[in-house]
Image (cartoon, grey):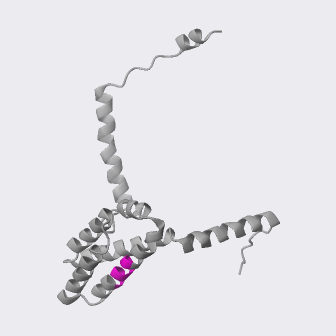
Amino acid sequence: MSITKNTQGRKKVARQSDHSASKIQQAKPRFQAEFVEKYPNLGVVHEAEIRQFVTTVPLAHLRAYGGRFYMLMEALEAARQKPSTKTQRGVIKLIARLKQESPNRRYRQILQAMTEALPSEQGINRAAWTALRTVEMTFEWTNEYMFAFSLYTQWLKQDRQSGHKVKMKSN
């Protein structure tokens, strides 16, 4: 049997028409709407943007960015506890100072979105969530976390090799 006989025996696939391509494009927004419904955007920016920011920052600088967002998270928490124009202005001034500490475009965009959200109570909550989530994501990539995670995986490997099984205690 030759290769030409094999290729001739295959079924021909019709080229996708513009009509079927438009159906796929129409289905795409519907799927995205369902995704947004199931996983609502709780922050001032989408979580994917935060992840993009964190993954593009050099590991050596993550601790500094994490510290900045932690400071901001604390200020936003204080603004949530005692909402007033004075605390809002204080948070806005802090964000302005933090913006000047880095030329990173994504960092500045996140801070700008937080500034724009501050006038409302819901905006403060969303900004606080964004700061909290950024701190969490930055911690995931710090050297300490990576070290602790590698120790944990080594411990798991040793535990599995020794044949120990974790038993659940029943009351």
Q: Quadrant of the C terminus?
A: bottom right
Q: Is residue 165 above or below residue 29?
A: below
Residue at 27%, 65% in the rendered image: 109
Image coordinates for residue 82, horizontal then vertical, percent: 27, 90
Compared with 84, 30 (above or below) is above
- Residue 163 appears anywhere in the view: no
Residue 78 appears in which quarter of the rendering?
A: bottom left
Q: Is residue 59 left or right of residue 31?
A: right
Q: Quadrant of residue 25?
A: top left
Q: Position of residue 57 (x, y in %)?
A: 41, 64
Question: How far across and how far down the image is residue 76, in percent?
Answer: 31, 82
16 relative to 74, above or below: above
Nearer the observer, 47 or 167 = 47
What's the residue at 24%, 69% (across, down)?
112
Left/right placement of residue 99 relative to residue 39 reads left
Region rendered in magenta: 68-74
Q: Is residue 72 magenta?
A: yes
- Please identify the quadrant where the N terminus is shown: top right
Look at the magenta stretch and give its main secondary structure: helix
Q: Is residue 87 magenta?
A: no
